[in-house]
Image: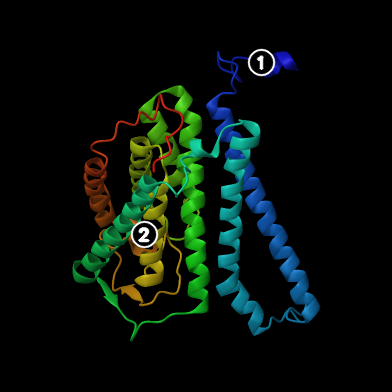
Amino acid sequence: MSRLWDNKLIKNRFGQVRSGWIILFAMAAFYILAWGVSDLFIRVLRQILIGTGDINLTTGEYSSLVDWLDEVSLPVAIQMITDLIMLIIPIAIWRLGMKRSVRELGLSSLGGKQNRKDGAFGMMLGVVNCSVIFLLVITIGKGRVVSDGIKISVLGFWWLLTFILVGVAEEVMNRGFLMGVLRRCRNLPAIMVVPSVIFGLIHLRNPGVTFFSVTNIVLVGILFSYMFIKSGSIWMCIGYHITWNIFQGLVYGMPVSGLHVPGMITTQYTESNVLNGGAFGIEGGILTTIVTLLTFIGVWYYYRNSKYDFVNQSEKPDAS
């Protein structure tokens, strides 16, 4: 058994388990646990509703509470469960399996002045980019605001918490963990592109997904990877990810990767086209492609004086 474990296909010349196996294990653990815990949650909820009489197995009738849970609350709960698991899995493998510091995941303390600055700049980029695309969609992209006023709801608050969790979890997994594991190969293009492709592929099951929308998400993933390699911190990635989702869905009322959430205003498309991205939302449109490409310039300028070497420097020094 030990000879099999020490095989060159399993371990590299330094006696480390190869990056590909670690990534495969992490993704398999995530999908298995996410499916298992979500399924268990739904089964337990169903039994509770049967016990309360909201689901009648004899007549097959459902109460209005069941419809509300199924259409409104359950998607939020499942999303939160999924992203909690996405956050726990890489940190557990990194700390318990690989015995590495959480700082090496790009999660240096927000007490550092530079980290706070990076996070704030990322949040600003997310707001500005999403707002520019929104304005273009409603002017030239066949989009229109159909709400009669600003609306704030309790459900919107839960989606706010969810989007914060999504931003943190997806960046810890796809940037901090995957790029951290691949750092050992010292191949910068692979370190940037492989996690970005995985980032795109995890959206394949989203409603309204298209080849172009996945391509755009991969491109955004490369942008986030660029932010990480220039700084050794994922706070800019997290900031951008959070505000992009919040403004896209909760502020402007547009689909977020195919998901519909209650916005402060509601934006609808009179027709789906290459500008607005159709059912998937603006992430499936060419406006996002153009804005993302331009953002590379902004990030390059922001980090123009950075001397950080992502490949050879495993930890980012604390910034004060």
Answer above or below: position of 311 versus 147: above
- Residue at the far bottom in the pictured view: 148
Answer above or below: position of 67 versus 86: below
Residue 181 at x, y = what percent? 51, 31
Residue kind at label 2, given as amino acid type: Trp
Asked if one can make out residue 212 in the rendered structure from this viewpoint, the answer is: no
Q: Which residue is mark 2?
A: 244
Q: Say which of 43 and 92 sits in front.
A: 92
Q: Quadrant of residue 249?
A: bottom left
Answer above or below: position of 171 versus 161: above
Q: Quadrant of residue 144?
A: bottom left
Q: Residues within 10 Å of mark 2 (few under 14, many from 20)?
A: many
Q: Which residue is mark 1?
A: 6
User: Dot 2 lies on which element?
Assistant: helix
Q: Quadrant of the N terminus?
A: top right
Residue kind at label 1, given as amino acid type: Asp
Figure disc tally? 2
Residue 17 at x, y = what percent? 60, 23
